[in-house]
Amino acid sequence: MTLLSPSVSARATEPGLLPIDAERWPDVARLPRASALRTAVARTLVERALSRLPLRTVTPRDLSSADGSSSAPTLTLHDPRAFHRRIGADGLIGFGESYMADEWDSDDLVGLLTVLARHVDDLAPAPLRRLRGAWVHHRPRNDRNSLDGARRNIHRHYDLSNELFALFLDPGLTYSSAVFDSLPGRAADLEAAQHRKIDRLLDLARVGPGTRLLEIGTGWGELALRAAARGAHVRTITLSAEQRTKAVERVRAAGLSDRVDVELRDYRRTSGRYDAVVSVEMIEAVGPEYWPGYFGSLRDLLAPGGRAVLQAITMPHDRMLVTARTHTWISKYVFPGGLIPSREAIARHSAAAGLGIVHDAGYGEHYAETLRLWRERFLDQEKAVEALGFDRVFRRMWELYLAYSEAGFRAHYLDVRQIVLTTTGGQEG
């Protein structure tokens, strides 16, 4: 997939501004419409909020006279007018688009975003938070995860390029949180940490010789391969054509085609009974209106005595409710149609489907380390990413996405859980 094109915004002729492909990035290439009053209000609110946080906001002129004694993360505004105008028009979507447009930077992007994540409820005055619904953007109906919509949404992220993901993931191409032997994690340990995570999930699912295993969300096939190596018979389903192609290739190369079937299939179009169902960081792509059906499918797909094992990113319930009503920068550019659930939402919807949680353990700090290693490798591979056809706006978008996600875990705004569900319930020791 190529993201470069000859259609470039006129902003490219302005000194100091990033050339932007206006066809590929229309809302980044042009500044949004926003009245002078709205922009001024946004500037006042943003400056007031940031002044109360442990960070510095500067312009390039300020940097020339800075003494460098402060250890606080720095937000450098290259174009304050554009920055405040985007936020005035589009809130946090504008904040992200401003970064994509090179209008602001930071000497410690993760540190800056961690501060903002820790104080997310303090960024706007309480009276304005109560009026939030009047000015935020609502999620597009076209992003709903209907049968057709889910395929489109998965395609937009996971079918970007297998070669792109290979540049920053471990050799097994595992795109979910690792579990390290010790923290902080090291790049040299990432593959082993991913295997440790997969093996914990397979142990929780009690996968062994003869186990009939269904995996919902194939990725690039590493879990299916490790399950088959234990002697399991694996059916793994995905909506990503690119991932399926690579997974089939890897299964064939491993000589496990007799034990692993990789299908391009929606979980809602899947039948059968399985001793175990494993789904790793897939519930985030389901969408809240489809959670009842998702947990109902898990129940229906389990054989008597079977176990469903999830690895799921979670957020606090009150923040989930706000996010569910809001079109965010992440939902616009990174994961259309997605929503991170809360532990309460998982418990409620699984119970309604007749499933009980028997195990629930968190590894949020391990995800922060996983994301750090991915981000560092992604940045180290800038030239290779560019050679695949991904332009600078895309690279800044993905840098922000990886840093934003890491900050969420470092601020404990996000967590990642390994959860076991059964039809019998009853917490395990």
Image (spheres, grey):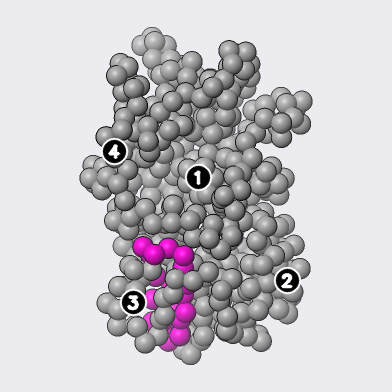
Whichever of callouts 2 and 3 sits on the residue coming sooner in the sequence is 3
Which image quadrant for residue 5? top left
Tell me the CA gap for discs 1 and 3. 31 Å
> Viewer-nearest of labels 1 and 3?
3
Q: Within 10 angstroms of label 2, few (less than 14), some, or many (20 or more) residues?
A: some
Q: Which residues are magenta?
A: 221-243
Q: Is residue 84 above or below residue 182?
A: above
- At x 74% / y 30%, what residue is drawn? 131
Q: Secondary structure at mark 4?
A: loop
- Residue 72 shown left or right of residue 191 in the figure: right
State yes or no: discs 2 and 3 in contact (Cβ < 8 Å).
no
Tell me the CA gap for discs 2 and 3. 33 Å
The circle on residue 251 is 3
Q: Nearer the viewer, residue 327 or 206?
A: 327
Whichever of callouts 2 and 1 sits on the residue coming sooner in the sequence is 2
Whichever of callouts 4 and 1 sits on the residue coming sooner in the sequence is 4
> Viewer-nearest of labels 3 and 4?
4
The circle on residue 353 is 2
Q: Secondary structure at mark 2?
A: loop
Quadrant into which the C terminus falls = bottom right
Q: Secondary structure at mark 1?
A: helix
Q: Within 10 angstroms of label 4, few (less than 14), some, or many (20 or more) residues?
A: few
Residue marked by disc 1: 405
Tell me the CA gap for discs 2 and 1. 30 Å
Q: Amino acid at mark 1?
A: Ser
Whichever of callouts 1 and 3 sits on the residue coming sooner in the sequence is 3
Tell me the CA gap for discs 3 and 4. 36 Å
